[in-house]
Image: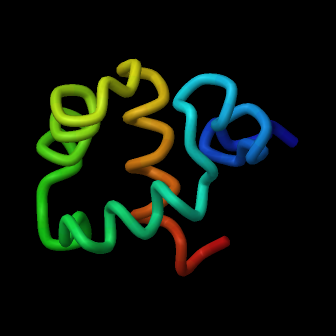
Amino acid sequence: MKTDYWNVSDEQVIEKTGKKIDDWMQLLETFNAGEKKSNEVVAYLQQEHNVPRYWARTLTTRYLKKDEL
């Protein structure tokens, strides 16, 4: 079975973004990411927090799927 790309470890996220997954999830909660289009959330992470595109997409998807994890 293929692993979902948003199923990443804290170590990976810290290495690529400088913050833990929980920190990003809290930030996205504060941003009301669940009420926005995913592309808007990705752009926010890239522009306001200098998150590389792949990781911005990964974190956005992980946030939006949090209830399924």
Q: Nearer the viewer, residue 6 or 11?
A: 11
Residue 34 occupies quadrant:
bottom left
Q: Residue furthest right?
A: 1
Q: Residue at x 49, y 66 (%)?
A: 65
Q: Is residue 54 left or right of residue 48?
A: right
Is 2 situated left or right of 41 in this image?
right
Left/right of residue 40 with respect to residue 59 in the rendered view:
left
**25 is higher (above) or lower (below) than 21:** below
Q: Position of residue 28 (x, y in %)?
A: 32, 62
Q: Residue at x 61, y 44 (%)?
A: 6
Residue for point 79% across, 38% down: 11
- Residue at the front extreme, as displayed: 18
Rendering coords of residue 37 (x, y %): 13, 54
Q: Residue at x 60, y 75 (%)?
A: 68
Where the N terminus falls, by quadrant?
Answer: top right
Quick check: 14 left or right of 1?
A: left
Q: Nearer the viewer, residue 34 or 13?
A: 13
Q: Residue 41 placed where, x, y %? A: 21, 47
Q: How is the image coloured?
A: rainbow
Above or below 45: residue 24: below
